[in-house]
Amino acid sequence: MKKLIVTFLSKKIVYATITKSGLIGNDRKDMTEEVLDVVQDWFLQTGYKMRQIHLKNGSNPTLFHTNDPDKINEIKKILFSDEEVAE
């Protein structure tokens, strides 16, 4: 069976064969850029500015989409308040 997964070490999104024992097989393709492009296209085509995902574990990660530089900088300040903000 093939599926999209995030690899543990490289943190890349890959389309890979999963073995019966649950391991990633050697047949894999890095899809990180393609997946991010599709997500961006989805935001642009739907007009949504935010998408919150409700997970079974009770957490609610949220994606935001904006082209407004001021909003981008404000979001970065909030997200990276304990770190240096990269431009």
Image: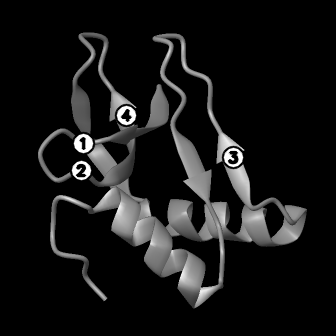
Which residue is identified by label 2? 11
Q: Nearer the viewer, mark 2 or mark 4?
A: 2
Give the residue type that dot 2 points to: Lys
Question: What residue appears at the point 22 percent right and 23 percent down from the top-left corner?
Answer: 23
Q: What is the x, y in percent for residue 83?
A: 15, 65
Give the residue type that dot 3 points to: Arg
Question: What residue appears at the point 37 percent right and 51 percent down from the top-left corner?
Answer: 13
Secondary structure at badge 3 equals: strand
Q: Which mark is residue 17?
A: 4
Residue 21, quarter of the rendered image: top left
The residues bearing labels 4 and 1 have C-alpha atoms spaced at a distance of 12 Å
Which residue is identified by label 3? 51
N-terminal of the pair, mark 2 or mark 4, is: 2
Q: Please name whichever residue, 62 or 14, is drawn nearer the observer in this view of the structure.
A: 62
The residues bearing labels 3 and 2 have C-alpha atoms spaced at a distance of 22 Å
- Compared across the picture, whether 74 is left or right of 6 comes to right
Asked if residue 40 is positioned above or below residue 22 in the image, the reply reads below
Question: What residue appears at the point 48 percent right and 35 percent down from the top-left corner?
Answer: 3
Q: Please name whichever residue, 30 or 81, is drawn nearer the observer in this view of the structure.
A: 81
Q: Nearer the viewer, mark 3 or mark 2?
A: 3
Number of marks present in the image shown: 4
Which residue is identified by label 1? 7
Q: Are marks 2 and 1 in contact (CB under 8 Å)?
A: yes
Q: Label 2 crowding class (10 Å Cα cut-off): few <14, some 14-19, many 20+?
A: few
Q: What is the x, y in percent for residue 74?
A: 47, 73
Give the residue type that dot 1 points to: Thr
Q: Please name whichever residue, 34 or 87, is drawn nearer the observer in this view of the structure.
A: 87
Asked if residue 59 is positioned above or below residue 10 in the image, the reply reads above
The residues bearing labels 2 and 1 have C-alpha atoms spaced at a distance of 5 Å
